[in-house]
Amino acid sequence: MTQKTKSPHYGELEEKQKEVVTSQGAFPLDGRGLPGQETILALFDELDYQGAVQAYLWGISQMDTRTPQEVRTLRRKGEP
């Protein structure tokens, strides 16, 4: 949700959000459009989660390429 506010530089064209909507839900903003302490912590938790998922996805390809190499090495040594 947004609300129109008066600005000495831009008249009544400036709008401020009342909340930030993420995959974790909606987080409220104060009257100046800034996040509160709880919102900041929740958004950083969301960033940590997204970073962990991205690292996992990038790591999958590394594991896929390493495993066949290890299998070939073991077969050459005569191990089952």
Image: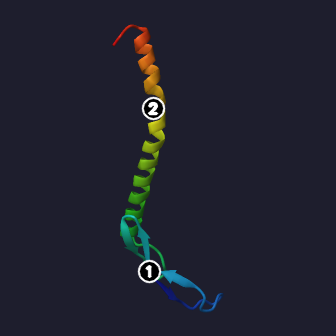
Question: Height in image: 42 above or below 75?
Answer: below
* Residue for point 38% across, 63% down: 41
Which residue sits at x=41%, y=12%?
75
Residue at screen point 40% across, 72% down? 36
Q: Position of residue 33 (x, y in %)?
A: 48, 78
Q: Nearer the viewer, residue 12 or 60?
A: 60
Which quadrant of the structure image shows residue 78? top left
User: Residue 47 appears at what percent x and percent y?
Assistant: 44, 57
Q: How many numbered discs? A: 2
Query: Of the residues under marks 1 and 2, which one precedes in the sequence?
Result: 1
Task: Please identify the residue farthest to the top as the structure is shown.
Answer: 78
- Residue that label 1 marks: 18
Residue type at the position of mark 1? Lys
**Element type where label 2 sits in the image:** helix
The numbered dot on residue 27 is none
Residue beneath the point at 38% across and 72% down: 26
Taking depth in this image into account, of 63 and 45 the one nearest to the observer is 63
The image shows residue 29, relative to residue 68, as above or below, that is below
Q: Say which mark, if any, is on residue 64.
A: 2
Q: Quadrant of residue 38?
A: bottom left
The residue sitting at the left extreme is 80
Q: Residues within 10 Å of mark 1 (few under 14, many from 20)?
A: some
Q: Secondary structure at mark 1?
A: loop
- The quarter of the image holding the N terminus is bottom left
Q: Does 30 sit above or below residue 63?
A: below
- Residue 53, given in percent of the width and then of the height, sits at 42, 49
Q: Amino acid at mark 2?
A: Asp
Distance Cα–Cα, label 1 vs label 2: 45 Å
Q: In the image shown, does 3 or 73 lie closer to the viewer?
A: 73
